[in-house]
Image (spheres, rainbow, N blue to C red):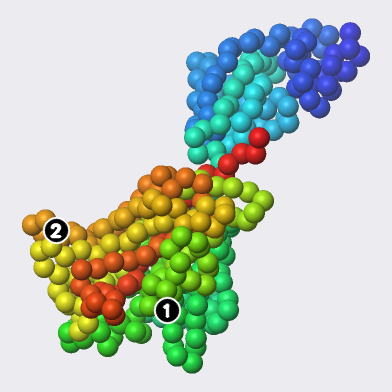
């Protein structure tokens, strides 16, 4: 009997896949070691990224608990009430071990995890973007290649438009910043202070909080978008595009977070030498367009008001605003264009054409 107990107890320690048979409670030198048959306690349905809670209603004083993934032997929890998030769909066999002194009880559960609606989502996350070697500006940093020609920056599956000419002190497209400054820099009524202070965001950081990285966009419309073929997309003809993935995968648009940049925000509120103070009827908008896998510009678009004085008061947010762009469908690029009622015909907006972007989200299309 001792040999049989030792052999089966060893199997128990090596792998709980044997729990479909009798499971022994403990190993000792006593032939009368108690054992228990695992007790099935039912099945739980969940989806990926949602927390699963299983309360076995045991709560025996002095007992210790272990929730074990029966397939991998990983201990998922040591609490009496199981709380866990499964990020991969599938059927999971769990074993709850309850120990009181030298006595054990075992309970089995099945968790069936389906795919949540956002299982294949990819969201821009700049928290790991390296700004340690960036240029020091306004008490923070900007991407080191902001003024370097022929360089793009990437994060995850996203590639961002960028043009620069250092000798002209010029850039357009996108750059990355973690600057918290959202104050006005036109205290004298001019725009002179803004060229050295064009890196902020009204929320003082990205969607993850103050001082976290975010993307700053500047719309270089004059030599690009205004000259572009409006039906066929070409990276060289558009200023503010984001490429999504590559030709091996396809993605549907989901959402993007936008925020006001301090320069147009304060210019719309007070004027800045170029821009005039907004009056009733004025607005400043950003339009988001999509490009299909054949490089054709989609006919539909989404327009968001960064500043809106069509009503009785000027509405401008200081926070990030999440914009639903799912109507664009499958996209290989999205791009942004701006419009303002404060403009000179033939010359473009007087409003400073800056904006801030974060948390672009797309849904990877599963291959059949």
x and y percentages locating residue 118 in the rendered image: 50, 39
Q: The C terminus appears in which quarter of the rendering? A: top right
* Location of mark 1 (residue): 223
Query: What residue sits 85% from the left and 13% below the top?
Result: 5
How crowded pointer 2 is (Cα within 10 Å; few <14, some 14-19, many 20+) is rated as few
Say above or below: 117 vs 23.
below
x and y percentages locating residue 90 in the rendered image: 64, 27
Is there any visible trace of residue 118 in the rendered image?
A: yes
User: Is label 2 in contact with label 1 (beta carbons under 8 Å)?
Assistant: no
Query: What residue sits 63% from the left and 56% below the top?
Result: 246
Q: The N terminus appears in which quarter of the rendering? A: top right
* Location of mark 2 (residue): 310
Answer with the quarter of the image where residue 23 lies: top right
Left of 176 or right of it: where is 42? right
Query: What residue sits 27% from the left and 75% below the top?
Result: 349
Report, in whole angstroms, how far the alpha carbon at label 2 lies from the one at label 1. Answer: 30 Å
Work out whether residue 302 or residue 228 is closer to the camera in this orientation and state it.
228
Say above or below: 158 vs 183.
above
Query: What residue sits 8% from the left and 57% below the top?
Result: 312
Work out whether residue 98 or residue 43 is closer to the camera in this orientation and state it.
43
Secondary structure, mark 2, is loop
x and y percentages locating residue 120 in the rendered image: 56, 41
Left of 285 or right of it: where is 61? right
């Amino acid at each position: 009997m001792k040999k049989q107990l030792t052999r089966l107890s060893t199997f128990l320690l090596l792998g709980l896949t044997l729990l479909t048979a009798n499971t022994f409670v403990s190993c000792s030198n006593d032939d009368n070691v108690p054992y228990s048959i695992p007790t099935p306690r039912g099945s739980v349905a969940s989806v990926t990224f949602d927390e699963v809670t299983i309360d076995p209603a045991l709560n025996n004083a002095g007992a210790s608990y272990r929730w074990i993934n029966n397939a991998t032997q990983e201990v998922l929890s040591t609490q009496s009430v199981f709380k866990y998030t499964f990020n991969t769909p599938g059927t999971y066999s769990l074993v709850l071990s309850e120990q009181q002194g030298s006595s054990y009880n075992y309970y089995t559960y099945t968790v069936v995890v389906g795919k949540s609606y956002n299982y294949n989502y990819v969201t821009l996350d700049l928290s790991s973007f390296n700004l340690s070697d960036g240029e020091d500006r306004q008490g923070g940093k900007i991407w080191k290649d902001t003024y370097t020609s022929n360089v793009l920056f990437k994060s995850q599956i996203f590639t961002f438009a960028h043009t620069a000419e250092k000798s002209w002190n010029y850039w357009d497209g996108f750059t990355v910043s973690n600057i918290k400054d959202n104050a006005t820099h036109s205290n004298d009524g001019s725009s002179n202070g803004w060229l050295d202070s064009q890196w902020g965001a009204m929320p003082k950081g990205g969607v993850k909080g103050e001082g976290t990285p975010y993307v700053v966009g500047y719309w270089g419309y004059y030599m690009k978008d205004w000259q572009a073929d409006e039906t066929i997309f070409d990276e060289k003809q558009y200023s503010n595009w984001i490429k999504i993935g590559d030709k091996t995968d396809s993605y549907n648009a989901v959402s993007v977070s936008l925020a006001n940049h301090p320069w147009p925000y304060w210019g719309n509120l007070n004027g800045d030498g170029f821009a005039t103070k907004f009056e009733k009827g004025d607005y400043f908008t950003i339009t988001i367009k999509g490009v299909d896998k054949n490089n054709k510009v989609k006919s539909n678009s989404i327009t968001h008001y960064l500043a809106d004085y069509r009503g009785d008061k000027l509405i401008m947010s200081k926070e990030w605003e999440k914009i639903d762009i799912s109507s664009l469908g499958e996209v290989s690029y999205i791009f942004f264009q701006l419009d303002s009622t404060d403009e000179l015909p033939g010359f473009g907006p007087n409003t400073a054409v800056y904006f801030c972007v974060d948390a672009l989200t797309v849904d990877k299309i599963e291959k059949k």
